[in-house]
Image (cartoon, rainbow, N blue to C red):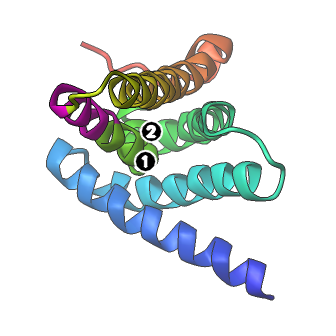
Amino acid sequence: MNIFFELLEDGIFASIAAIGFASISNPPRKAYPFCAGIAAAGHITRYILMNFAGYHIILSSFAAAFVTGIISLPAARRIKSPAECISFPAMLPMIPGMYAYRSIQSLIKCIESTAEPEFIHYMYMLKLNWTTCLLTITGMVLGATLPVFIFKKFYFKQKA
């Protein structure tokens, strides 16, 4: 039962963040519930893959973004809006902020270090965190856009 509440909590917080991110990107009002639901589904997918299946954040984020992209296609057709206006606000709660923060923190520590072993340690931490952050975001972008290319037939296009 505890696992259920962990997943529910993760989904609720992802939904709240997605609604906040969606509000600043100005999608149609009927897109908000879809953004919230899709964010919860994507974030719960990543949470399960990371915490129960043991996958790394990069692969888990790619899979969660792919799930987000797949679910966004029928939702976009329903509200007659491009899938990106639903999927990207829904994916923003999955941005690996701690890795970006640790990258900048390691960079500052690297600049401040006076001893060579300390410098090498912080340079290693900078490379590790920055690479993880960059690959995670790249995986999310690829995961979200692949469904659009795979399922072109179901993709809603705005008519000019």
Can you identify the residue that label 1 sits on? 90
Q: Position of residue 72 (x, y in %)?
A: 53, 39
Q: Position of residue 96 (x, y in %)?
A: 43, 42
Q: Position of residue 130 (x, y in %)?
A: 40, 25
Q: Residue drawn at (66%, 18%), measured in percent from left and top?
A: 151
Residue 152: name its quadrant.
top right
Amino acid at circle 2: Ser
User: Which type of secondary structure does the marked residue at label 2 adopt?
Assistant: helix
CA distance for labels 1 and 2? 5 Å
Q: With 40 as the anchor, is 159 left or right in this view?
A: left
Pointers 1 and 2 in contact (C-beta within 8 Å): yes
User: Which type of secondary structure does the marked residue at label 1 adopt?
Assistant: helix
Q: Residue drawn at (75%, 49%), measured in percent from left and top?
A: 49
The one of 81 and 111 positioned closer to us in this rendering = 111
Amino acid at circle 1: Ala
Can you identify the residue that label 2 sits on? 87
Q: Which part of the image, by quadrant, shows the N terminus? A: bottom right
The magenta segment is: 103-112
Is residue 95 visible to the viewer in this orientation of the structure? Answer: yes
- Residue count near mark 2 (Cα–Cα under 10 Å), binned few <14, some 14–19, many ≥20: many
Q: Residue furthest bottom?
A: 1
* Magenta residues, dominant SS class: helix
Q: Residue drawn at (21%, 28%), measured in percent from left and top?
A: 114
Is 17 magenta? The answer is no
- Residue count near mark 1 (Cα–Cα under 10 Å), binned few <14, some 14–19, many ≥20: many
Q: Position of residue 147 (x, y in %)?
A: 62, 22
Is residue 92 visible to the viewer in this orientation of the structure? Answer: no
